[in-house]
Amino acid sequence: MIGIQSIKTYTPGTPVSIHSLQEKATFDENELSYFSTCGIDTVYDSGNISSYELAKGATEKLLQETGTAAADIDMIIYVQSRMPEHFISSEATRLQHEIKADNALSFAITNLGCADSSMALKLAKDFLVANRKANHVLICYGNKLFSQYRFRNPVTIMGDGGVAALISKTADHKIADISIQTNGKYWDLFKLEYKNKSADQYKEACSDTRKYGFELAIESKNRFKEINDALLKSNQLVKEDIHHFLLQNISSRAYEYYQSAFDIRISPICAINLAQYGHLGAGDIFLNYQTGTESGIFQKGEKVLIMNNSPVAAWSSILIEV
């Protein structure tokens, strides 16, 4: 059996009220309305700490608090930040070298946005199933502001933070099933032009807000229904067998939308973390599962369904048996 042995988050700095962000003064009426009502109160600002340092900080915390030796890690899956420190160089193998995980195979994944974490979990599970001698896979990620603007209109507000997860051969927090779908039709719905621009000019833009808010929203509902129905059927379950539904932390409106669409209740863990941390990109679902586990909300034997999607677009659902 393959399960999540441990998850640790790393959020250096102090929480900053979203209403103290300087960019707020530049918003028009519609932007200000969404910004103020998306369910986020504070975000962590890590200052000059890079996305790599956030990922490494979470990794070191995990190794120390779980007593795991870096030499025992068989694979490192480094989820690449949208804005790495350098082009060309390898942050994945840098992490391997600096934590002294000399026996690990290390590589990075990217381009699926929030759903990168779902793909990382699938790759970790598949690797451990396929390799009898392997026991541990480390997944790590650092979410860092990639421009001067934390507000991703019309989506969410970005916070800084690192996350690390240890996936192992264990019966606890069993990864029962993972299903992922993608659609290249939306590949450039969001983008940040950087050529011939200085860093202070970087700003992410949505090429078509109606396409995001209407067309993609409807497709996301349909995709999740298809994925969830098939996942439940293949595991001989029905919706009522799921004790907890989790979603990545985008906005309170997203929770309301999917709760209404599927007649489910998104765990209040998500709204609590959304309000405190904002959006941590691919780290959201790890943070939410960690919170449910460490708080005692998730009980042994319960089933958790994690829905995780991205406007690139990608959709995934993960079934975990606590």
Image: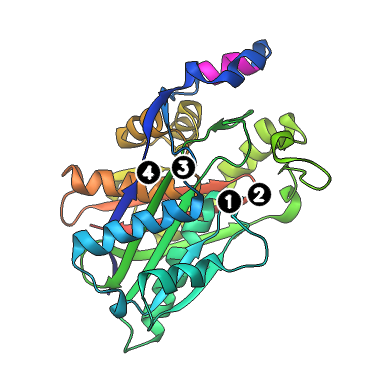
* Residue wearing tag 1: 113
As helix, strand or loop, the secondary structure at mark 3 comes to loop
Drawn side of residue 307 relative to residue 208, left or right = left
Q: Position of residue 313 (x, y in %)?
A: 64, 50
Q: Give me the C-alpha separation between circle 2 and circle 3.
A: 16 Å
Q: In this view of the protein, which residue sits in the foreground, 160 or 218?
A: 160
* Residue wearing tag 2: 312
Q: Give me the C-alpha separation between circle 4 and circle 2.
A: 20 Å
As helix, strand or loop, the secondary structure at mark 4 comes to strand
Q: In this view of the protein, which residue sits in the foreground, 91 or 174?
A: 91
Type of residue at label 4? Leu
The answer to if 42 sits in the magenta stretch is no
Mark earlier in primary sequence (2, 3): 3
Type of residue at label 1? Gly
* Residue wearing tag 3: 280
- Residue 56's disc is none
The answer to if 35 sits in the magenta stretch is yes
Indicate the quadrant where residue 209 lies. Answer: top right
